[in-house]
Image: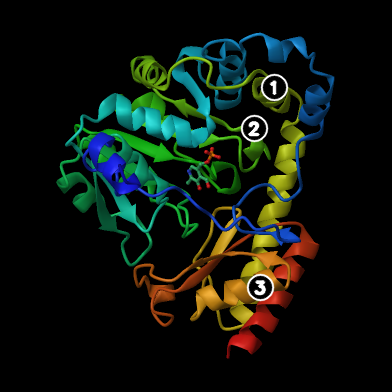
Amino acid sequence: MTSSGIVRAFTRPGYAALQLYTPDRAPARVDLSDNTNRWGMPPAAADAMRRASLESCTRYPDAYAAPLKEALAEYCGVNAEWIATGCGSDDVLDSAIRAFGEPGDKLVTCDPSFSMVQSFARMNGLEPFMVPLTEAYDIDADRLRDANARVVYICSPNNPTGTVASRASVEAVADDSDALVIIDEAYAEFADANLLDLARSRPNVLIVRTMSKAFGLAGLRVGYAVGAPALVREVEKSRGPYKVSALAAIAAVTALRNDLSWVRERVTQARTGRDVLERGLVARGMPPLPSSANFVLAPARNAEAIARRMRELGVAVRPFSQLPALPLLREADGAAIRITVGPPNEVADSLDALDVARARCA
Ligand SMILES: Cc1ncc(COP(=O)(O)O)c(C=O)c1O
């Protein structure tokens, strides 16, 4: 049987069209393509991993990562039964969609937003539906609500725009809809405010967060959800046991207990670097969207070519060629590059490489 015959014979209908996620991960001297923590790993967490006993790798970890839930609960100011964990927030999002959406249901998300969510919807048999952001880069509460979806996904600060959803719009969606409202706050630590309180005040709101960004633990894969105990129990059921490895749990708990001031200092530095990067882009006639995250999105005609040139110069950024024509992206026909904010030398490297790449692409 040919490989396409095998796919036809055995794959679930609607599944075969899904593609593997294949980011361009060729090594780069300065990788500013994935919004991770460019300052590295929290020191106490790194130490704890080095000292971890090998026995912790031989035994199964706690089934639902109870010690990690305790530490996250303290960090978020809730009780542990309000927390579910996962193998990265990808796993938490996937599990939540599976727990609350039946195959055939609709999941509504914004355009543009974190694109993996559309894949998670499809993997679980749901139909993704997109609602454009407004001209003010806010979510369109009316259209999200009117979509009559089973799951609403809102990302704030939003990837890839860096912009935030207004509290009023998010509350309007949560209050006037029977849907599960997932608010992805992967970049919450870099913003002025967050929406965590909505998990406590709204029974249909699930906040999803990660330790991959501000906490610098992307390689360990630790994500979590905060929501009413009845909600997070369903997410855990759908997720299954043993999803946070023993070493990941050791590092994450240590980071939460002993590295918070390190994390906060790095967040402050990222916010300062964001201002510098934004000013540099404005000076180059590429005013970025107003960012509340650790990255900025700047309009760039020839985004793919510019990113390729920048990578040749050792600096990796993420190009987008077909984003909706939001106001600051209009002149570039929706083409843009997303640049992660790193320490000052990396901000300077990114602007220098951008200058050379643009000159070569002109
Ligand atoms: C908005 C958003 N949500 C979730 C994720 C997934 O993060 P992780 O699975 O590493 O927790 C990312 C990663 O880039 C993201 O940008």
Q: Which mark is residue 220?
A: 2
Say what secondary structure mark 1 lies in. Answer: helix
For marks 3 and 2 on the same chain, the one whose residue lies earlier in the sequence: 2
State how far apart marks 1 and 2 are (Cα): 8 Å
Q: Which residue matches tag 1?
A: 247
Task: Tell me the amino acid under the disc marked 2.
Answer: Leu
Q: Position of residue 282 (x, y in %)?
A: 59, 78
**Is residue 172 shown left or right of residue 358?**
left
> What residue is pinned by disc 3?
310
Q: Amino acid at mark 3?
A: Met
| Mark 2 closeness class: few <14, some 14–19, many ≥20 residues within 10 Å | some
Q: Quadrant of residue 333?
A: bottom left
Q: Considering the image in quadrants, where does the C terminus appear?
A: bottom right
Spot occupied by residue 278 in the image (x, y as percentages of width and height): 62, 69
* 62 over 95 or under it: above or below: above
Do the residues under discs 1 and 2 have CB atoms within 8 angstroms? yes
Residue 299 appears at what percent x and percent y? Answer: 49, 75
Could you say which quadrant of the image residue 199 lies in? top left
- At 31% from the left edge and 28% from the top edge, which residue is drawn? 98
Residue 129 appears left or right of 273: left
